[in-house]
Amino acid sequence: METAKPIRFWNRKYGVMCLVNLLVSISIFAHFPLFTYSIGRFGDQPALQSCCIMGLSVGMFLLGPFNAYFVDAFRRKGVCEVSLVCLIICTIVGSISSSLVMSFFLLLLAGACFGVFEMSLGATLINDLSISKRRTATDYYFTWFGLFGLPLGAGLAVWGLHAIGVDNVYYVTLALQILSLLLLHPIKIPFRAPNRVPLMSFDRFFHPGALLLMIALLPIAIVPGLFITGHWTYQLLFMMGGGFIIGFAIHRVFFMEADSRSDAVAGLILVMTAMLVVMHSASPNAYWVSSVFLGVGLGWFDSRMLLYFVKMADHCQRGTLQQTYIITLITGNCLGYVLGMQDINVQLLSLILAAVSLIFYLTVVLRWFKHIKGRDFKFREI
């Protein structure tokens, strides 16, 4: 039997997998502005139309209980590739859909495929190719490539709708998914013996012990969803993406060894500051500053929360918690989209959501997490 050979960190295989995650995430998040642009074809039903995007989130829960069984009963790389092929089919059919009901079920199926893809690639294949002492780092950076897909995918779609047209944007997202499949296929994955897991379980899907972390993360995950409905220009979305990178870099370079409260609180305060800037002034410069502040704050806070999820794992639970983190983010993004399509003040709502996350984090999550782990959380192996 072929055994797993540990790989060096940031080698070619790992880099290709991170790139595949980024490309597929871009194609997924590009559908948010695309759907906003396309709903005019379905008649005047704004409430139903905006809620259709929730099919993407709901779909991730449909096949979630079968995740562990899929990667145990079938070849793990095959599961990843089949889910990606199904996602490509959903994109092809979605580009010609003219029915609201059909669009909902396509988004439902796309969400299910995306959930299986993320689980099989990030929570399974990445760990199969990593040595145990480096898996926290590999999971952390891999997930971050997916996070950056939100502003980049939304920005790309908003730009493309005006520059090349809606049909061509669909072709671009389709090309990204096909390219991802071509990049993934040549990678050789070591064989893993079956564990004979049950048909349905929470393994590689959802960790009930992370409920408090999910409650803290969900409100702030709603915030970017409010701004990918077409309210912001592609320049602002790209600026938010640049802020994501800055927030990640600040956390990684300056705050990795700091008290966990410092960067989480600073990130949330930056999100609230970003909203106060545009509430005070509607000038173009205010929006530029706000978009960068928002990206930095989200990237900063999300980085800390990702480490909380990964580091609370016991043996063989890291993939489950990683998937729980991703599901929470996608659910929040979809909820934000639904709310952003309504006639509300998105800046005020974002300010309130950030304040709720901050209060809950300081009063509940911080004490609980330190209690269950019983040590100071300085993630030195990252």
Image (spheres, helix red, strand yellow):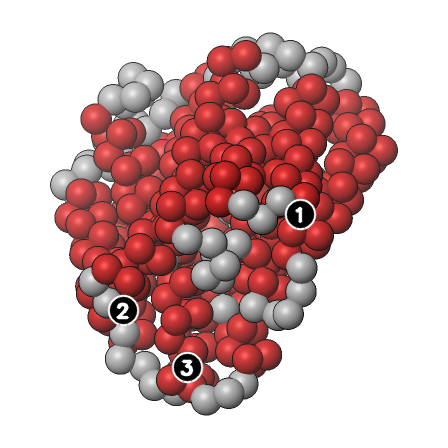
The mark that comes first in sequence, 1 or 3, is 3
Disc 2 residue type (three-letter): Val
On-image quarter of the N terminus: top left
Label 2: few (<14), some (14–19) or many (≥20) C-alpha neighbours in 10 Å: many
Q: Name which quarter of the figure residue 12 lies in.
A: top left
Q: Secondary structure at mark 3?
A: helix
Name the residue that disc number 1 marks. Answer: 279
Choose between 370 and 279: the one closer to the eye.
Answer: 279
Whole-number angstrom distance, CA of label 1 to CA of label 3: 30 Å
Name the residue that disc number 2 marks. Answer: 166
Q: What's the mark number on residue 40?
A: 3
Q: Residue at x 73, y 15 (%)?
A: 375
Q: Are marks 1 and 3 in contact (CB under 8 Å)?
A: no
Q: What's the mark number on residue 45?
A: none
Observer able to see residue 343? yes
Choose between 233 and 376: the one closer to the eye.
Answer: 233
User: Is residue 220 depicted above or below 318 in this figure?
Assistant: below
- Looking at the image, residue 218 sits to the left or right of residue 64; the answer is right
